[in-house]
Amino acid sequence: LATDAPLGVGYLRQVTLYGKLSSLRDGAPLALDRFAVPSRAVWTSYYALGFVLNAGCLMAGATWAAGLLQAHLLRRLWECLRVTRFSDRPMHPLQALVGLGFYTLLPLSLHLEHWARVGSGPRMGIVVS
């Protein structure tokens, strides 16, 4: 697929081809493929983690954006548990880590931005002009 690409780009391309696009991967297994995680578990953990972290941040001070995020996370978690039919194809562990990082930082960034605007909350050296 990407034999003429710079070092690491071919591997990155292989990692990003999953789900319906996984048929485009070359036949060689990737180094971390043996640690692949079922997609249902990954997506459910994204929304569950985001829901719990956002609930904790909501206790520190509710904003309309955090409330909307909480509703979104709850809806997506419910969809993962009750509605969505996931494929049998597993998710690469690097993709799972990126998603966990995103859903960890999303609620925290909303609340840090809110605290920076109103001037209360934790002092973390944030300057908003």
Image (spheres, rainbow, N blue to C red):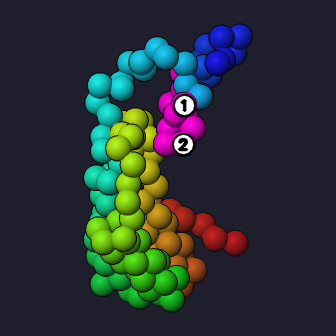
> Which percent across, then down, holds residue 78?
33, 74
The image shows residue 81, relative to residue 21, as above or below, that is below
Q: Is residue 32 left or right of residue 119?
A: left
Residue 57 visible, this orientation: no
The image shows residue 87, relative to residue 37, as above or below, that is below
User: Where does label 2 land, which residue?
Assistant: 20
User: Where does label 1 land, which residue?
Assistant: 23
Circle 2 packing at 10 Å, graded few (<14), some (14-19), many (20+), is few
Q: Nearer the viewer, residue 98 or 17?
A: 17
> Which percent across, then down, holds residue 100?
38, 52
Residue depicted at x 45% and y 45%: 98
Residue 44 visible, this orientation: yes
Q: Quadrant of the C terminus?
A: bottom right
Q: Amino acid at mark 1?
A: Ser
Is the C-beta separation of discs 2 and 1 under 8 Å? yes
Which residue is outermost to the top? Answer: 4
Q: Amino acid at mark 2?
A: Lys
Identify the magenta region: 11-23
Residue depicted at x 62% and y 22%: 9
Quarter of the image where one finds residue 4:
top right
Q: Is residue 120 left or right of residue 74?
A: right
